[in-house]
Amino acid sequence: MDRRRFLGTAAAGGAGFTLGAGGCAPSDAGGEAGGGDEGAMTIRPFELDEVTVDALQASMASGERTARSITESCLQRIEEMDGQGPELRSIIETNPDALQIA
């Protein structure tokens, strides 16, 4: 196979993959009539999404949060997303001593 044919095949395959991925996009809340998502999983928002380090430090300084409570929240979210939910497996392993260290 020559270089041009290889690049053409790779480009076509990449375009097909990209265009085909549209079927994986979340559906609109309204949905189509009769085409409900009864089996679709709802992912709840994570309380620490978009929270800055400064905000976390301030909440710890005020006593609202502790290192342990933040660690527990993160470990719970990892379990929800990787252990049960959509099984992203985005975290390879967690530190078994994380709570003790926190």
Image: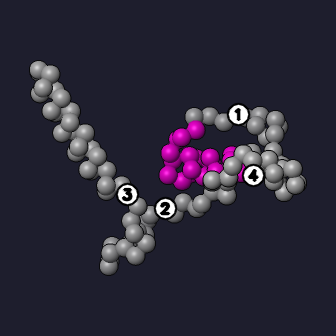
> Quick one: label 2 or label 1, which is nearer the N terminus?
2
Q: Are marks 4 and 1 in contact (CB under 8 Å)?
A: no
* Mark closer to the observer (1, 3): 3
Residue 76: in sight, yes or no?
no
Q: Is residue 85 magenta?
A: yes
Residue pointed to by mark 4: 55
Q: Which mark is residue 41?
A: 2
Q: Amino acid at mark 1?
A: Asn
Q: Amino acid at mark 4?
A: Ala
Which secondary structure class fits the magenta region best? helix
Q: Is residue 24 magenta?
A: no
Residues shaded magenta: 72-91
Q: Is residue 23 above or below residue 18?
A: below
- Find the distance from the CA under tag 2 to the CA under tag 4: 30 Å
Locate residue 3: give its quadrant. top left
Locate residue 93: give its quadrant. top right
- Find the distance from the CA under tag 1 to the CA under tag 3: 33 Å
Q: Residue at x 49, y 61 (%)?
A: 41
